[in-house]
Amino acid sequence: MSSTPKKTHPLAETDTRILERKLRKGEITREEFEKMLASLPDSGDHVELDEQKIASIIAKKD
């Protein structure tokens, strides 16, 4: 009986939390970790902040 290879999570190579956990468990090396981090896009390039919306949410909490 052959075992089916474990399917990796779609975010396994893009979610830094998953990468950090793999590094701690020894599933990847520090070099692999650094290489994967370097390949990730800069999230700052894709994030748009709606400052008015944030201000209104904060105002509702107060």
Image: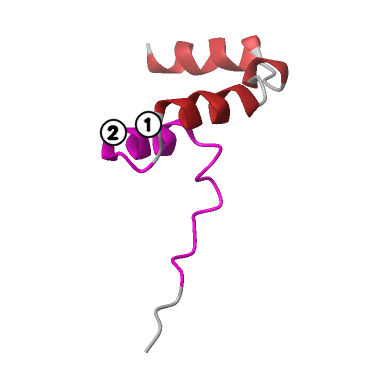
Q: How is the image coloured?
A: secondary structure
Q: Nearer the viewer, residue 56 or 34?
A: 34
Q: Which residue is mark 2?
A: 24
At 56% across and 52% down in the image, what residue appears? 10
Q: Nearer the viewer, residue 8 or 61?
A: 8
At 53% across and 45% down in the image, what residue appears? 11
Tell me the kind of residue under disc 2: Arg
For the C terminus, the quadrant is top left
Q: Is residue 54 above or below residue 22?
A: above
Tell me the kind of residue under disc 1: Glu
**Residue 56 place in picture, x, y as percent:** 55, 14
Which mark, residue 7?
none
Circles 1 and 2: CB distance less than 8 Å? yes
Is label 2 in a helix, a strand or a loop?
helix
- Residue range of the region highlighted in magenta in the rendering: 5-27
Residue 56 appears left or right of 33: right
Judge the density around disc 2: few (<14), some (14-19), many (≥20) Cα neighbours within 10 Å: few
**Residue 51 place in picture, x, y as percent:** 63, 10
Judge the density around disc 1: few (<14), some (14-19), many (≥20) Cα neighbours within 10 Å: some
Residue 35 appears left or right of 27: right
Q: Is residue 21 magenta?
A: yes
Is label 1 in a helix, a strand or a loop?
helix
Q: Is residue 11 above or below residue 37?
A: below
Q: Residue furthest left?
A: 25
Q: Is residue 34 above or below residue 17?
A: above
Spatial separation of the CA atoms under disc 1 and disc 2: 6 Å
Q: Which residue is mark 1?
A: 20
Q: Quadrant of residue 40?
A: top right
Q: Nearer the viewer, residue 26 or 58?
A: 26
Q: Is residue 15 magenta?
A: yes
Q: Quadrant of residue 4?
A: bottom left
**Residue 29 place in picture, x, y as percent:** 40, 33
